[in-house]
Amino acid sequence: MCGVLGVSNIPNAARVVYLGLYALQHRGQESAGIISVDDDEVAHAHRRMGLVSDIFSPTVLDKLPGSVAIGHTRYSTTGSSELSNAQPCVVDYHTGPLALAHNGNLTNAAELKRDLVEKGSIFQTSSDSEVLVHLIARSEAREPEDQILDALERVEGAYTLVLTIGKALYAIVDPRGFRPLVLGKLNDGFVAASETCALDIIGATLVRELQPGEWMRIEDGRVHDLPPLPTKPHRRCIFELIYFARPDSEVFGESVDLVRRNLGRRLAREHPAPGAECVFSVPDSSNAMALGYSEESGVKLEHGLIRNHYVGRTFISPDQSTRTEKVRVKYNPVRGVVDGKSVVVVDDSLVRGTTSRALIKMIREAGAREIHLRIASSPITGPCYYGIDTPTRGELIASAHSVEQIREHLKVDSLGYLSLDGMHNSLTGSATGYCDACFSGNYPIATPDLESEASSVDIPIPAAVR
Ligand code: AMP
């Protein structure tokens, strides 16, 4: 999963992108980068592993001049977590530098990459996004926009892109619209960003959200709408609203906060916890859900778990042992809240069960008498192939275990998951066509091998190139 941002016709564009990337940090914490294009159409790049705050300094930003820039925060789904895969990527294109930042996952990248390598393409990275760059560069069409179209017609899967060719900025959303992208206005320029919270931080006003299949060229303070990509059934990612996006964002025409409250309310109706004395969230992603649960059930909302904000999302840990360790570092129960009580713990989702099992143990040790775990989404039974970093099917606790088996494993007194209908009915906007494949198994794109990990397209590259 990733955050992307592009700005056009704004002085010191890289500084604006830098600020915006701060607001998109939650979408990717492995690496970040900015590429600016100056008035002579020369590209300047800075990409590093780590957090936005550690990567950029005033000195670094001074070396990224120009009024056009794009940025990226990365959380790898395809391609390993290493500097060579940090984005945006940039290449010399015949009409100037071509830079690209991608959010999503191309489901036919491995196939396309093999084909391109056979035809002589030399890849610099193992990420799927570079496939797009090669496809654009190799297109036989004459005009850059036709070349982009050529490339987009060959890729399958999820792609939300900000792309520059020379000083032209393109904002693109794939025909199914898996990942969000919004257009904002700032002074004489425009901003395209993964989420509205990035517009807020830089003081831009929301113009509108891009619809599935929409793309546009932004240049010299003007937006040129381009003919939409061939229509496909819309498949907006429901997990963006459940977990991924920030609650202060508007995504797919929905207030993320409101949807999460609704999820909590419905959860309370579907799975009440009679006799419970308080309810609290696993902060922060479930805060709004616990609030909704409390409002609906009348059970008192408490802060039962405190989160240490200096630790990243636990899921990002590369292996299981550090993940378990990190849970302890990240959360601590408030003894005075839980001691001797029957408590409801609300979490947004259950993936491997690792975090929850460790958390439940801690809450029990802090004196809770009964623990009722409520999950504001359905059991995750399959991986995501469209850009969310979920583990393989085998690691997903709900892929092979019943709710009762999971309850026993987690050692909770009761466990309730929100139904699929409950999830969909929590949405309030007019957008239809959501992807819920990781919950329902209803995958919108037939991938060559649904059982193989998305990372199988991580084709090794020679050490010399790294
Ligand atoms: P676990 O108990 O190990 O299954 O972890 C569940 C926690 O992981 C929940 O609190 C979610 O908020 C969080 N989570 C769910 N999906 C993801 C994801 N793709 N990346 C990071 N964290 C996630």
Image: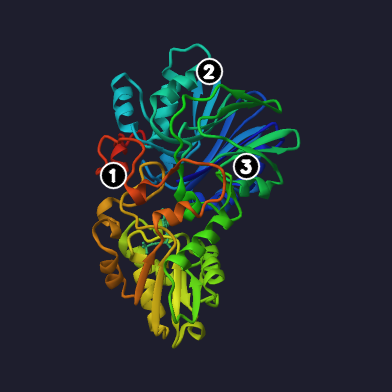
Question: Residue 208 lies in what quarter of the image?
Answer: top right
Quadrant position of residue 187? top right
Q: Which mark is residue 144?
A: 2
Q: CA distance from mark 3 to mark 1?
A: 33 Å
Q: In the structure shown, which secondary structural element does the residue marked by tag 3 occupy?
A: helix
Count of numbered tags: 3
Can you tell which of label 3 and label 2 is closer to the viewer?
2
Q: Residue at x 42, y 54 (%)?
A: 421
Q: Quadrant of the C terminus?
A: top left
Residue toward you, 171 or 137: 171
The amino acid beneath tag 3 is Val
Q: CA distance from mark 3 to mark 2?
A: 24 Å
Q: At which x and y percent is residue 17?
A: 62, 42
Residue 82 x/y as whole percent: 40, 45
Q: Residue 207 location, x and y as percent?
A: 68, 38
- Report how far apart the C-alphas of labels 2 and 1 lie in the structure: 34 Å
Decide which of tag 3 and tag 1 comes sooner along the chain.
Answer: 3
According to the image, label 3 marks what residue? 17
Q: Amino acid at mark 2?
A: Pro
Taking the spot 26% from the left edge, 63% from the top edge, the residue there is 402
Sequence-wise, the earlier of marks 3 and 2 is 3
> Residue 344 appears at what percent x and percent y?
45, 75
Q: Quickly name the residue at label 1.
A: 453
Q: Is mark 1 within 8 Å of ligand 1?
A: no
- In front: mark 3 or mark 1? 1
**Does dot 1 land on a helix, a strand or a loop?**
loop
Judged left or right of residue 371, residue 291 is right
> In terms of secondary structure, where does tag 2 sit?
helix
Q: Which residue is at the front of the view, 278 or 203?
A: 278
Q: Viewer-proximal residue, 456 or 335?
A: 335
